[in-house]
Amino acid sequence: MFSGEYEHSLDTKGRVIMPSKFREALGDVFYITKGLDHNLLVFSREEWDVFYNKLNTLPMANKNARGFSRLFLSGAVECEANAQGRVLLPATLRAYAGIDKDVTIIGNGNKVEIWSTENWNNYIDALDPEMIAESLCEIGINI
């Protein structure tokens, strides 16, 4: 289970240090792909296999299912951290997430998310926790 928030910067080669706490749980090989909020999602090999298998069960005849699958699979890359814990973020993924220099890496349950720090701060500032809590109560989730 991933949790926490870490701030880092890209180096000149487009690499970012993955927090050691996350590296241990992700394992030697993990996957990075596009997220729904113009962020990047990072899955361990095991979680990627689960996610990939779910995507493969989506009906090809459904336009939304095809688009959903394409979003995640077209940008997916297999990664390994180097000896210093750095991970290369491909230019296409950096562009998708608006990542230029400053990066915020967060744990979100079964996955890690990588955000441009500016986008992360804007996202957090726009959240209305009370409204979210009320809407979740309507579907039986109480905090």
Image (cartoon, helix red, strand yellow):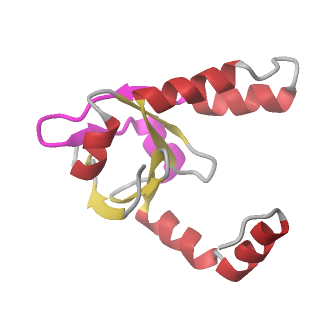
x and y percent of residue 91 in the render?
Answer: 40, 38
* 77 magenta-colored: yes
Image height check: is 25 above or below 117? above
x and y percent of residue 50 in the render?
Answer: 56, 27
Asked whether 61 or 75 is in front, the reply is 61
Horizontal arrangement in the rendering, residue 108 relative to residue 67 (left or right): left
Where is residue 107, by image quadrant?
Answer: bottom left
The image quadrant where one finds the C terminus is bottom right
Q: Is residue 74 visible?
A: no
Q: Residue at x 38, y 63 (%)?
A: 4
Horizontal arrangement in the rendering, residue 104 relative to residue 87 (left or right): right
Image height check: is 28 above or below 110? above
Q: Residue at x 82, y 33 (%)?
A: 64
Where is residue 87, by image quadrant?
Answer: top left
x and y percent of residue 123 in the render?
Answer: 58, 69
Among all residues in the image, which is located at the extreme bottom? 130
Horizontal arrangement in the rendering, residue 3 relative to residue 76 (left or right): left
Among all residues in the image, which is located at the extreme left? 83
x and y percent of residue 33 in the render?
Answer: 50, 36
Q: Count the labels in the image.
A: 0
Asked whether 61 or 95 is in front, the reply is 61
* 35 magenta-colored: no
Q: Residue at x 43, y 45 (%)?
A: 94
Asked whether 136 or 72 is in front, the reply is 136
Q: Residue at x 27, y 58 (%)?
A: 9
Image height check: is 89 above or below 5? above
Q: Which residues are magenta?
A: 74-98
Image height check: is 36 above or below 80? below
